[in-house]
Amino acid sequence: MPADAVLTLPDDLRSAFKDPLGPLFTDAEMLLDEAGTPLIAVGDIVTYHLTQAGVIPDVAVIDGKTKRTAVDAAITEAIGGYERSHEVTNPAATLSLDLLATLREAIDAPETTVIVVEGEEDLATLPALVAAPEGASVVYGQPDEGMVLVTVTPEVRHRMISLLSQMTGDHDAAWAALGVDAE
C-alpha cells in the first residue's frame, strides 16, 4: 500500500465497480432534472458536462484525466467558477486520508469546491456517497457510456460502507476522516 493511502482496492474487488450504481444518462440537462443537492461530481468529463449545462457542482473531484489519458486543455479550462480549490494526492486504486478529509470538508462547506487530485480520483465516488447527506446526488462517469447519477439513501450509504470495508487498510482512520460511524 502506498504510504499516503489509507485504503487500497484489492484486485478481487475490482469487479464490484463495473456495473453502474444508478441510472445512466447521456444528457446532462436530463440528469440535472433528476439530481438532488448538494451535487457532487467525480471526474473531469462529468464535471465538464454539468458545467456546460449551466450548473457548477457543489463539489467536483477531478484529476485532469479521462480513461488514464490527459483531458483536452479546453475541458480543463471550462471547469471553473469554484469558490474554493484544494489539491490532494491520491495514488491509483487507493483512497488517501488527504482525499477523504478534503472531500468531507468540501461537502460540509457552504462554498462550491473543486478538489484537484494528483494521482487518480476514480474511487472518490464511494466516500462521497458515504459522507454526503441523504438526498444528495453523486455523479460519476461510466466510460464510453455516460454519466451515472446516484442519490444518497441509507441503503446506498450502507452498500458503500460495505464496499469500503472490503478494501484493505486503516478503516478506523477512513471512517474518522469521513465523519461516519460505520458500525
Image (cartoon, rainbow, N blue to C red):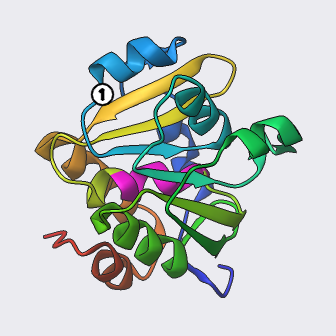
**Is residue 136 toward the left or the right of residue 134 in the image?**
right
Magenta stretch containing residue 131, yes or no? no
Q: Which residues are magenta?
A: 122-128
- 130 above or below 6? above
Quadrant occupied by the N terminus: bottom right
**Is residue 34 toward the left or the right of residue 145 in the image?**
left
The foreground one among 177 and 94 is: 177
Residue drawn at x 12%, y 46% is 154
> Residue 117, percent across and down?
66, 64
Magenta stretch containing residue 123, yes or no? yes
Residue drawn at x 83%, y 36% is 74
> Residue 155, percent across and down?
15, 41
> Residue 141, percent across and down?
57, 32
> Residue 171, percent across and down?
36, 77
- 99 above or below 155? below
Q: Quadrant of residue 149?
A: top left
Tally of marks: 1
**Is residue 101 toward the left or the right of residue 54 in the image?**
left
Q: Quadrant of residue 116?
A: bottom right
- 136 above or below 181? above
Identify the main secondary structure in magenta.
helix
Asked if residue 6 shows in the view, the reply is no
Asked if residue 86 shows in the view, the reply is yes
Label 1 environment density (alpha carbons within 10 Å; few <14, some 14–19, many ≥20): some
**Is residue 119 toward the left or the right of residue 176 in the image?**
right
Mark 1 lies on residue: 35
Residue drawn at x 46%, y 26% is 148
Of helix, strand and loop, which one carries label 1? Answer: loop
Quadrant occupied by the C terminus: bottom left
Q: Quadrant of residue 104?
A: bottom left
Q: Amino acid at mark 1?
A: Ala
Residue drawn at x 58%, y 19% is 146
